[in-house]
Amino acid sequence: GRAGPRGGWVGLVVALCALCFLADEASGIKFRMFPQLNQKECVSESVSENQWELVLESVEANFRKNAKRNLTDQEIAVRLASFRRPVLIEIGFLTMSPNPSDQTMKPVDYVITDDRGNMLSTRTSITQEEVEWKSHVGGKGPYTICFTANKEFGVVEVDLSYFHINVPEAVGTKHMKHSAELSEEDLRDMKPVLTDEELKYFAKEEHILELKGDMRKVGTAVYQAYYEQQHIKQIMNRQHRGIWQFAVKVKILGSVEAFSIVLCSIIQYICVRRLFRGKKSGSVRGGLV
């Protein structure tokens, strides 16, 4: 994704934090928000170049096939630019304090928008979220999620475990329910196409189309499982950090308690010894008199 922080040196700090995190974990972005200086930070993502190119190849092939005439480059460019299809938006994030010893909640608000600026989803006071948005028909992107931090909670660290825009198979699947939002041309052109090489090894066209559809569905499931695992890993890291802090506090308090017991025992021993020593001295004086 492309981080889009707004505001002077704060944006530079956020970018540096994101780059440092990506050096160790390429699966997400971690950045800090300073609400006293800039309350809003945005991150954008689009369908991957390779995936969208494959989609447009199918669109162009179907468009040429159904046109039944020679098309100009301008006509093809206009068709590809206007193409829209169901997209799957997957986002996972959690918030925490940048200070490991601070276990207070750091809720934020967020808004998800598409490439045309239309709002897709919004929620307030969230510390952990997994979004799987399936009910949108759009283009390549970019799609943007903007976080807004509250000044009363101070500095917030946002761990964006994953932000992925996928193009699932739509024809003949549950994504077909969006057909009312799609034009007839989009429904026609989004179908998989066959290559000459594939036709040499498969006897029937429907076999290849079915296989391609299954491959797309498998790819979608793999991506979803991978990013969910990354999100769960980040949740576990946050929980382990809290447990470690609790263990340190228990260890320190236990040491203080043990030291206090030993100190009290020593003081009690000294006091009792002085008490008996004083009584013994008094008894000796009485006998002499």
Image (cartoon, helix red, strand yellow):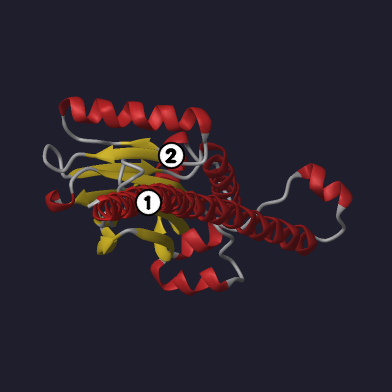
Q: Would you identify the image quadrant in which residue 39 lies?
A: top left
Can you see residue 286?
A: yes
Disc 2, SS: helix
| Circle nearer the viewer, 1 or 2 | 1
Please state the horizontal and vertical placement of residue 158, each as a whole percent of the image.
Answer: 33, 46
Name above or below for residue 282 compared with residue 184. Answer: above
The residue type indicated by label 1 comes to Tyr
Tell me the amino acid under the disc marked 2.
Ala
- Which residue corresponds to the image point at 52% horizontal and 56% vertical from the top-left? 232
Residue at (34, 47) in percent of width and height: 270
Above or below: residue 195 compared with residue 89: above
Relative placement, left or right, of 140 versus 7 is right
Q: Quadrant of the N terminus?
A: top left
Q: Residue 116, can we see it?
A: no
State the residue position of label 1.
269
Q: Position of residue 178 (x, y in %)?
A: 45, 70
To which residue does mark 2 refer?
77
The label shown at residue 163 is none
